[in-house]
Image (tube, rainbow, N blue to C red):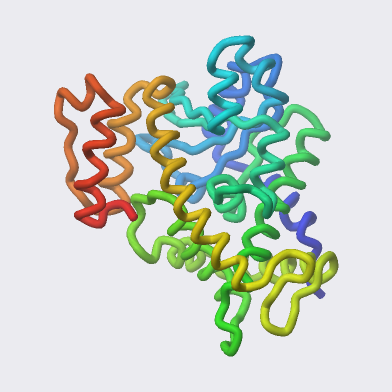
Amino acid sequence: MVEDLRSLVAAELAEPVEPRAEALAAAVAALYPQAARAVLFYGSCLREKQLDGLMLDFYLIVSDYRAAYGKGWMATANRLIPPNVFPFEADGLTCKYAVLSEQDFARLCRPEADNVSVWARFAQPVRLAWVADDEARRLAVASVSDAIVTLFRLTVPMLEPDGKHGPIDIWRRGFELTYAAELRAERAGRGKSIIDYDPARYEIFALAALAEISRKHGVGSDGEVANYASPDALRRRWRTMQRRGKRLTLLRLAKASATFAGGLDYLVWKINRHAGTAMTIRPWQRRWPILGALTLLPRLLMRGAVR
């Protein structure tokens, strides 16, 4: 019997995290006492037992940007180019956290989102490291469930119609498409390695997502998702998202230079870690981080360090 997708998501979100990571998430939430609703822990550090020296990845979900920041420019920046990203450190652990309102979190996990950056991350394993109340938990479960359904609705029509595709094949194709829709530092095949870490999880979630889509929308004989889009329309949609996603990466990088102290150092560290490069930052690039990041980009593209 195929398990219900929301039940699977709720159980995964509720799995315990390393106590120090949980404490760090609570400390992030405490920075926004009038607005914090949930802190979601995701990314490669989720699988690590030894967190010292690593940078954890959190999403902080807030009630709204005005409640989080007041009337300043940060609220406008977060609304126009979500999310804002900040570094934080407490008790010897370091993280970066991205801020989204509950409304934007829900919107960016749905198929109508104009970029992949949120739903592609939350289709992968995630934990609810801190939550304000049961309603915030319910909304987090709903958005993460939508993220998985979105990946499947946008990927199934992109499979070869004459091939035989198992549940894992859908994930692999989905990650290929989403990784191509952003400027990424990870090596080719990164999506496959994520799946290979826990293939049973991905198969169970795939079956649940397909059942959810079939129940609500149906899937046609050629892979088309009923009441949504044809394969040809989705191919055009993916090309548009790929162009937009790379532009958004640059815009967010520029915005982060105003919110993320040492953001350029973090960017280069991550590229070196995932792409196996040895990039260095020159003193003038630290003084002018936006220009420095833009001048790094052609070199990274030529070396294949980002795609």
Please provide percent x and percent y for residue 192. 45, 67
**Which residue is located at x 75 percent, y 79 percent?**
220
**Which residue is located at x 46 percent, y 41 percent?**
248
Please provide percent x and percent y for residue 90. 46, 21
For the N terminus, give its image quadrant: bottom right
> Toward which corner of the image does residue 167 lie, by quadrant?
bottom right
Viewer-proximal residue among 187 and 292: 292
**Which residue is located at x 42 percent, y 41 percent?**
249
Above or below, comparing residue 217 to residue 66 in the picture = below
Horizontal placement of 246 versus 125: left or right? Answer: left
The residue sitting at the top extreme is 71
Viewer-proximal residue among 50 and 153: 153
Viewer-proximal residue among 128 and 69: 69
Viewer-proximal residue among 237 and 19: 237
Horizontal placement of 96 versus 12: left or right? Answer: left
**Which residue is located at x 39 percent, y 38 percent?**
250
Above or below, comparing residue 264 to residue 110 in the picture = above
Total numbered circles: 0
For the C terminus, give its image quadrant: bottom left
Above or below, comparing residue 62 to residue 280 in the picture = above
Please provide percent x and percent y for residue 48. 45, 47
Please provide percent x and percent y for residue 294. 27, 36
> Toward which corner of the image does residue 188 lie, by quadrant?
bottom left
